[in-house]
């Protein structure tokens, strides 16, 4: 899952995979999607963090919920 970002503006586009959530339930895996936006705007739209940290490389991160995220490929 590659991607790119502009460190001057904060704009980004990354390939992602995950699960579709419908009516509060995981319904199916999704892949070959992109998430695009601006890092400052994204972090300002953080609305919730989970209590489920998982190891990712050398650090742990919980599930994160953001408002107004742009996805393509779904």
Image (cartoon, helix red, strand yellow):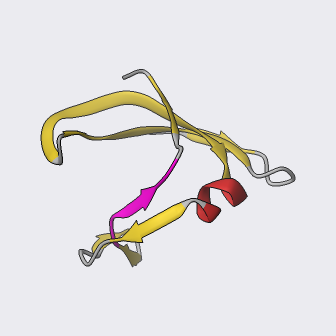
Horizontal arrangement in the rendering, residue 33 relative to residue 70 (left or right): left
Viewport quadrant of the C terminus: top left
Determine the image quadrant of residue 56.
bottom left
The residue closer to the viewer here, 59 or 73, is: 73
Task: From this view, report whether residue 72 is shown above or below residue 67.
Answer: above
Region of the chain picked out in magenta, as a range: 62-67
Horizontal arrangement in the rendering, residue 12 relative to residue 29 (left or right): right
Indicate the position of residue 58 as horizontal and vertical percent values.
41, 76
Indicate the position of residue 33 as horizontal and vertical percent values.
42, 29
Residue 49 magenta-highlighted: no
Task: From this view, report whether residue 33 is shown above or below residue 42.
Answer: above
Determine the image quadrant of residue 32.
top left
Indicate the position of residue 53 as horizontal and vertical percent values.
28, 76
Task: From this view, report whether residue 36 is shown above or below residue 74.
Answer: below
Determine the image quadrant of residue 11.
top right
Query: In this view, which residue lies farthest toward the right?
Result: 8
Residue at 80 percent across and 54 percent down: it is 7
Indicate the position of residue 72 as horizontal and vertical percent values.
48, 25
Query: In this view, which residue lies farthest toward the front?
Result: 23
Horizontal arrangement in the rendering, residue 34 relative to residue 37 (left or right): left
Residue 66 magenta-highlighted: yes
The residue closer to the viewer here, 7 or 64, is: 64
Horizontal arrangement in the rendering, residue 16 relative to residue 53 (left or right): right
Viewport quadrant of the N terminus: top left
Residue at 78 percent across and 46 percent down: it is 6
Residue at 76 percent across and 52 percent down: it is 10
Residue at 71 percent across and 59 percent down: it is 40
């Amino acid at each position: 899952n590659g991607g790119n970002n502009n460190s001057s503006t904060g704009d980004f586009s990354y390939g992602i995979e995950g699960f579709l959530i419908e009516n509060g339930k995981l319904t199916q895996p999704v892949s070959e999607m992109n998430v695009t936006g601006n890092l400052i705007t994204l972090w300002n739209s953080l609305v919730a963090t989970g209590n489920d940290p998982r190891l990712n490389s050398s650090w742990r991160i919980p599930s994160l919920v953001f408002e107004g995220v742009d996805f393509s490929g779904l």
